[in-house]
Amino acid sequence: MFKERNFLILWLGQLVSIFGGRFSDLVIPWVVLQVTDSPLKAAIVAISTQIAPLLFSLPAGVWIENRSKKKIAMLSEMIRTIMMTLLVVVILFGEFNLLVICSILFVTSLAGLFFRISLNALLPGITGRKRLVDAHNYLEAADAVSTLIGPILAGFLLSAIGAAATLGIDAFTFLLSFASIGLLKLGEKSFSKSKERKIDKKQSLQDGLEGVKLLFSTKIQRFISFNHSVLNFSTHAVTLLVVITAKQELGLSAFQTGILLSGAGIGNLIAIFVMARLKEAHWNKLYGSIMLCSGMGVFLIAISSTMWGAFVGMILFDGALSMAFVVNGAARQTVTTNQFLARISSGGILLSGIVVILANGFAGLISEGFNPILGLLFCAGLLLINSGISFAQLHLKRSISSLGFEE
């Protein structure tokens, strides 16, 4: 797929953008924990990034359907560049202010919402539906490389040059992503302004709610939505719990925590090669197996008393989880017609927003009131339950590529 110009440019843009995002994943909660010593406040900052998807995902999906996805994606990346630069300025010159930081992250996540919906709607046209599993796997490869190198480098830079300069690199990666989208050559249909203005608010809301209904419209869509919820909850809850555990339970430095988080990147890289060989496997067996592996990884993190034991757990947890995201994301786009791709994407983002707010709130509250280890054990149990449910889906004894459309 790298021989195709559009996909290569898109992949490179996402590689640098995700790389920068790995800096924020470590630096922002680390700074909050260092200043406040409160897991709950770290969770509040994380939650601020999910309020925009919760409020605007439905109308955003409908609004994007009738406009140029490329232009919206470019504008979104420029806004994220500006807002992340503003966060750098605030940290560099101002005192810590929870409200200001949450406000900046809210606007950044709103722009990110529009970018994600636009990108999801563009992807099938860039790659073709028959290669969506491959496309998602390649994008997971970008995530894997970023997750392997990003946290280690972020931990080193956080100690060496400070939080503001490290986040400045993140801002620059959004600018590079903006440039990559601008270089794409796409055959989007023309969108007239007169057509854009005909969509009223009532119709937009109805169409947005239709996107939510599509998430649960068939047995397969309901199964995908359940998996979608478990994956997003586990990813965000475990990531925050690991950072809190590293700092407060294991007593690790920022650099050591970066090494710990980079274990996820090693797992992702392994998963890329494994997934390429298993893409035609029966859906229920494949998904059940990787959920089992991911759950065991979280359990290992929870019971480990050293960084390296938790490091192995991160490899298992995030490697398997990246495969699960590939399978679930490709399945969603495979069983959804072109007409509703943006709409169902916005519905999925709304669902993600709700779940991620719950995940971050759960991680903060259980760490503040009890212990982050207890939260990790809960997440391990959730993944293992999902594994059993997946194995039981006997009607999914076929590959994802053979599903076709569900009308």
Image (spheres, grey):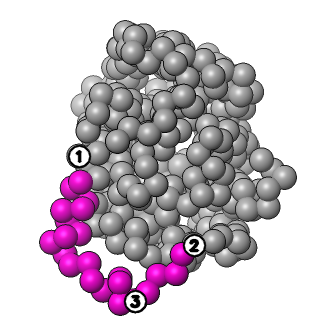
Q: Quadrant of residue 138?
A: top right
Q: Which residue is mark 3?
A: 193
Residue at the outermost bottom position: 194
Residue numbers of the magenta segment = 189-210
Q: Is 203 covered by the magenta stretch? A: yes
Q: Which residue is mark 2?
A: 188
On screen, 225 above or below 336?
above
Dominant secondary structure, magenta? helix
Of the 4 image quadrants, the one containing the C terminus is top left
Residue 70, given in percent of the width and then of the height, sits at 57, 72
Q: Earlier in the sequence, mark 1 or mark 3?
A: 3
Q: Which mark is residue 213?
A: 1
| Near-viewer residue (355 or 102) | 355
Tell me what residue is drawn at x 40 percent, y 89 percent: 193
- Which structural element holds mark 1? helix
**Which amino acid, by three-letter code, is at mark 1?**
Lys
